[in-house]
Image: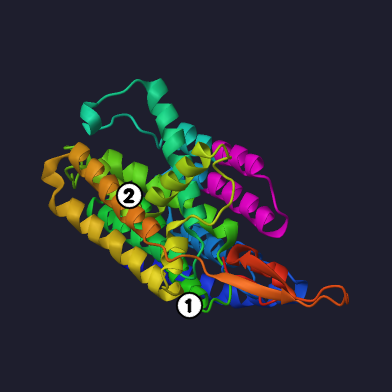
Amino acid sequence: MLQILATAIISFIVAFLAIPVIILVAEKKKLFDIPDERKLHTHTIASLGGIGVFIGLTFALLLSVNFQQSPEFQYFIAALLLMFFIGLKDDIIALSAFKKFVVQIIAAGLVIHLGGIRIESLYGLAGIYDISPVYGLALSYIILILIINAFNLIDGVDGLAGSLGILSTSLLGTYFYMAGMMPYALLAFSLSAALMAFLIFNFHPAKIFMGDCGSLTVGLICGILVLKFINVAANPASPFPIESSVALGIAVILVPLVDTVRVFAIRILKGRSPFFPDRNHVHHLLLDHGFNHSGVTTICVAANILFIVWVYFCRSLGNTPLVIGLFFICYVILGALFYTLPRRKLVIQRQIISSLQEKKPASKVIDLSTKKELGNEKVKG
């Protein structure tokens, strides 16, 4: 326990000291996230907070983890470096979704093939247990890349991605500690502590954003921890077995996962790339219902906690009913949020025509989504 506490403190302090320096450098070098019609902020803010999270996490891990006893961690850190630097480049110089996706596949390959983190069984989900290695590898890639992108896409409101990351890593870290798997507990709590330091500067109104370098880092670590948790907790011979580990693993990252699956499905059905940016996430729906940044974050985190508690106390029901129940309830709630959205208000602008031939001023009706054309304040979104 002392080792975990010391590692978490180191991670927190390093991240806490690094982030103000990052903010200062970003201001001097003009490295800002520029607001546009889809962004929720109305002024320039640095989007490099993930640098502090990455430095705190990596520094703490290098000091605390014994790589001879846990050789897979060297591959985790290699994959982490890939995710961090591709995210950093995207934060500074925008990259295409295809390039980021290719790097995600490479990072997932390091974790799966060299780190040994893969799905070998569905543990009764849909009545399926053991699966062939080919299907197991394919499913491992899909799940890991999906989780990486889930945290990347949920990072749209001050404090949201960081808070959900802390929730996931602190719970999974507690499990690994109780199961005697100290390296994974150190990995989880190191990230939790770094995110806590980051949230001091990210709660609304944010002084800095996490950026892709942070959200991709959080997504990769959470993906590793969730897959490891499912395999370990489902094994009756493990030090701390838990029934319905698949459902519980999904519940731990439910909000970002459900939101990403829903958004990807909508984009594909519309004939767009699943990585095409839009304003259709759960935090956008809540904002359109009148909640502020803090309210959206509180609702999402509280909902995720309630689902985790529900799955844990109903774990005897089995993976299949619980997973179906989780997605059914979530999509009913999201559907209700979507179909009860208030109607968009219209903005009327009168254009004064100087021509003497025009007796009446023309009027132009413009939706809020194009409000920027009016020359007024920039739109949140």
- Tell me if residue 348 is in the magenta stretch: no
**Amino acid type at image mark 2:** Tyr
Q: Position of residue 311 (x, y in %)?
A: 20, 51
- Amino acid type, label 1: Ile
Image quadrant occupied by the C terminus: bottom right
**Is residue 100 rendered magenta in the image?**
yes
Say which quarter of the image contains residue 242: top left
Query: Which mark's residue is nearer the viewer, 2 or 1?
Result: 2
- 273 displayed left or right of 308: right
Tell me what residue is drawn at x 63 percent, y 73 percent: 348
* Secondary structure state at the residue bearing disc 2: helix
| Quarter containing the N terminus | bottom left
Residue 38: image x %, image y %?
A: 60, 61
Quarter residue 100 falls in: top right
The x and y percentages for residue 176 are 29, 52
- Residue designated by label 1: 200
Indicate which disc residue 331 carries: 2
Front residue of 160 and 174: 160
Residue 237 versus residue 144: which sits nearer the camera? 144
Q: Which residues are magenta?
A: 77-106
Q: Residue at x 43, y 66 (%)?
A: 342
